[in-house]
Image (cartoon, rainbow, N blue to C red):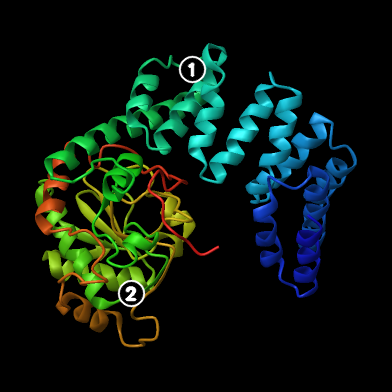
Amino acid sequence: MTNAMDEVRRLLKQDDLPGAVRSLRPHAETAPITELAEAARALADEAGFEDLADAARKAAERSHEPQSLYDFGYACVERGIAFLAVAPLREALRLLPDSRTLLAELVSALEDERRHAEAAALLSGRGDRLPAWPETYLLVHNTLFAGDLDTAERLVSALPAPEDPQWAPARERQARQVLRSGQSRRAQRRAGHPDPFGPADLRGWHYGLTGGLLATLSPYGWDAGMTGRYAYLGDSHELCRRGLARLGIALDAAGRRPTAVSLLPGRSDRILGLAAAAVLGLPAVPYAPDRTDTVVVAYDLNGSDPGLVRTLHARTDGQILAEHATCWTDPPAVSADFSTLLCQYAAPPWRDDDRPEEEIARDVAAADPAPDGGDGATPTDPDEAFRAFAAGVAPGWLAAPRDRVASPGPVPSSRFA
């Protein structure tokens, strides 16, 4: 750990706090907890996180006390560095193996790190001693997000209703995810997917977990860790136009007949919304939360007003939320009903274009919707397969609140640190 601590100090002297945090990741579960806590304290002092600094100091001094280890791990989770929480929480649970509080916090840290299979194994290891709420609920969640739908279906069917009413919304949300996932797998089979709900079925898992249709797969880096997602995307008019073409296919396959396109107030949202209105042959109207039978078009919901986005959580009858660039590393507050693509960061094609919105929208509507040939490694994704999938899940599409889903699920993709 000495070399790692030296690296932390070196990077902090260079005012590179993010780099200092990243430098600890390879050592987070091999270094002595005392040294991890000392490093975390240095990071917290630099960031001005007094709660984390205090918890790290106490953990360094009392590394064999479960309460100190718990407080340190909890502070790491709260401050967004859950990878540093796993080792102290695991040690605290070893010292107090029957603590439900420690178990729940360790599961939370593993979930934040997208280590769902480990969280599921930790919970299932309790066997018949595992309580129903929230522990078995968490087991279902992590089993599903680790990619084991069959076990999740079996577990959720035996999960009793919670005695505490605060868990009722979570139970309903989970039941919807498991039900949708089963529907999604069947739809992918009918659509001819070679491995429905396998580790590379990005479209199938995206629908099962979020309820949204994923229109396109990235044609670059499929076999280099991306599996259909983008990291950085330099967007184009053509890709925007392809997304709108796929939106038309989805609406037709699901038998949906909206009467208007609703424009959100952001510049990128308005440009894409005006283009959508032209492509779909519908009038463009200002967004109103209670407007029915309309397509609400967003370029990137993370770039929209948070208060406005929250109005989209509860579904208005016939309202369809279409987002072009959905962030998969930091998902928006609501899950769109339709996403053209999944990316970590997207640069709009008109970011340096000062022309009127209407002119840019006309260029988008007139662009070529043909797919990008990419690097040749991405599996083919013809319109017919997307149409078949959209038709297969149509009975359950647009049937639930647009819950945020924080984890990308079992399909892995490379990302910028």
Front-most of residues 342 and 354: 342
Q: Toward which corner of the image does residue 161 lie, by quadrant?
A: top left
* Residue at x 43%, y 37% (from the top left corner): 146
What's the amino acid at mark 2?
Asp
Relative to 235, is 368 on the left or the right?
Answer: left
Mark 2 or mark 1: which is in front? 2
Q: Is residue 347 above or below residue 224?
A: below
- Residue that carries the numbered disc 1 in the rendered image: 162
Label count reads 2
64 lies above or below 374: above
Instruction: Indicate the position of residue 23 as horizontal and vertical percent values.
Output: 68, 61
- Please name whichever residue, 336 or 188, is drawn nearer the observer in this view of the structure: 188
- Using residue 257 as the reference point, say whether residue 294 is left or right of it: right
Q: Is residue 313 visible?
A: yes
43 with respect to 173 (left or right): right
The type of residue carrying mark 1 is: Pro
Residue 333: horizontal and vertical position, in percent? 45, 50
Nearer the N terminus, badge 2 or badge 1?
1
- SS for tag 2? loop
Q: Are marks 2 and 1 in contact (CB under 8 Å)?
A: no
Residue sitting at x 77%, y 41%: 72
Q: Residue furthest right?
A: 61
In space, the residues marked 2 and 1 are separated at their CA atoms by: 46 Å
**Picture coordinates of residue 363, whole percent (x, y):** 21, 81
Residue at the image point whose x is 31% and y is 49% from the top: 200
Which residue position holds label 2? Answer: 235
